[in-house]
């Protein structure tokens, strides 16, 4: 090949390539031409391979022509690329057009389980009274669940708490959150204002008002000079915050081994407001918690001197409170987790 051949080939390559570029239908086609012509193993390089056979004086001329051809092809590629790019963008925008006026797909919102909702509200109220939430274990020992709460083995009051035992000797599933009182007293010094929400278990046959698994929220306040009047004031205030202003409340004598005196705390029936209805057993009242002044023996087991410290404690069922507030009549609904029951709480 001589100089003239090479220059002619370069010219021919330019012509055919420019034609191919203007005919290219899309950017992938342009990419193909780019590689075929300008690539490392492309047509332009192929022609320039012949340069070695030329006289040294001719080589720069071929180089200059080759550069012009390369420049022309590159410019044509760029121009066509811009042209096709704009068209493709327009087409893509049309294809991917989003109708912002269409309604969105609704996200299904989760919600708190009504037991948790009630416990959260209870905790929020008592936090305002300076109570701090603590946890205590679901697997307890007999000592803490019973004996240190002034319920010795064979005490008839054990019948109040039918117990599920576990495989570890001396251990059980706590039947109430009251053992948390002992743990809090052993762990900290007065003044104590503790709230202990948690799951409890009893060996019960399940019916509309009994579950073998349910929640309780325990409260404990211990300090010097705490009186029954402090307890009454606080629980009345709690009922007001929980059920609204102006509801009547009352304290009745009760019995728990770990408090002396012990009381039951009632709020006027939220369904009938007093005269009596099926929901309140025609009494006009609903019991929301048990409470009392912490028994001196219990303070002692907690490591506190009953001559110096007094306290009160209370225990309530969040499911029961939720039932009163929402007019729910069957406790079993709380643990069955049927979404149709949970749905209205969203
Ligand atoms: N632990 C009791 C129960 O499960 C409820 C209770 C009553 C807790 C009186 C207390 C209390 O702290 O003072 O029935």
Image (cartoon, rainbow, N blue to C red):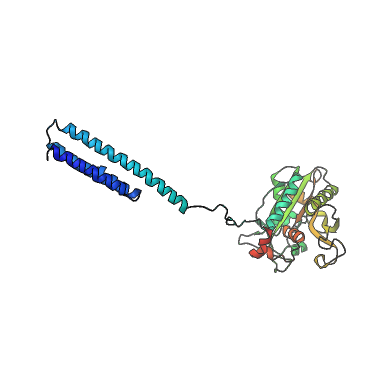
**Residue visible at 85% across and 58% down in the picture:** 253
Q: In the picture provided, is 321 more to the left or to the right than 78?
A: right
The answer to whether any part of residue 232 appears in the image is: yes
- State whether residue 268 is above or below residue 311: below
Outermost residue to the top = 57
Towards the viewer: 85 or 197: 85
Residue 177 appears in the figure: no
| Picture quarter with the N terminus | top left
Quadrant of picture, ligand 1: bottom right
Tell me which residue sits at (65%, 65%) in the image. 340
Report the residue at 16% width, 33% height from top.
Answer: 59
The image position of residue 67, as x and y in percent, is 24, 35
Horizontal side of 127 relative to 47 (left or right) equals: right
Asked which quadrant contains residue 248, the reply is bottom right
Q: Nearer the viewer, residue 167 or 115?
A: 115
Numbered marks: total: 0
Residue 118, placed above or below residue 22? below
x%, y% of residue 250? Answer: 86, 56
Indicate the quadrant containing the C terminus: top left, top right, bottom left or bottom right.
bottom right
Residue 180 in the image: x percent, y percent? 70, 52
């Amino acid at each position: 090949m001589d100089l003239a051949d090479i220059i002619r080939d370069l010219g021919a390559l330019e012509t055919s390539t420019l034609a191919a570029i203007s005919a290219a239908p899309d950017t992938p086609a342009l990419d193909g031409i780019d590689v075929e012509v300008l690539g490392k193993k492309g047509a332009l390089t192929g022609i320039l391979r012949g340069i070695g056979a030329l006289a040294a004086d001719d080589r720069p001329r071929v180089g200059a022509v080759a550069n012009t051809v390369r420049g022309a092809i590159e410019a044509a590629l760029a121009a066509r690329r811009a042209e096709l790019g704009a068209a493709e963008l327009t087409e893509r925008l049309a294809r991917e057009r989003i109708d912002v006026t269409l309604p969105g797909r609704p996200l299904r919102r989760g919600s708190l389980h009504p037991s948790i909702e009630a416990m959260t509200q209870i905790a929020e109220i008592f936090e305002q009274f300076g109570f701090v939430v603590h946890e205590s274990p679901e697997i307890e020992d007999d000592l803490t669940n019973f004996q240190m709460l002034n319920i010795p083995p064979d005490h008839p009051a054990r019948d109040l708490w039918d117990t599920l035992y576990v495989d570890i000797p001396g251990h059980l599933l706590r039947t109430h959150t009251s053992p948390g009182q002992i743990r809090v007293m052993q762990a900290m010094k007065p003044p104590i204002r503790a709230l202990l929400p948690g799951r409890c278990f009893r060996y019960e046959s399940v019916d509309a008002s009994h579950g073998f698994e349910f929640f309780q929220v325990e409260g404990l306040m211990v300090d010097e000079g705490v009186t029954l009047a402090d307890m009454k004031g606080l629980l009345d205030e709690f009922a007001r915050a929980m059920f609204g202003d102006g509801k009547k409340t009352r304290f009745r004598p009760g019995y728990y081994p770990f408090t002396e005196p012990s009381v039951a705390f009632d709020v006027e029936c939220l369904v009938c407001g007093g005269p009596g209805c099926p929901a309140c057993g025609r009494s006009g009242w609903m019991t929301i918690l048990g409470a009392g002044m912490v028994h001196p023996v219990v303070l002692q087991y907690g490591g506190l001197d009953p001559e110096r410290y007094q306290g009160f404690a209370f225990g309530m069922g969040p499911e029961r409170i939720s039932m009163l507030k929402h007019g729910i009549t069957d406790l079993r609904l709380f643990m069955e987790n049927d979404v149709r029951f949970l749905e209205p709480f969203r």
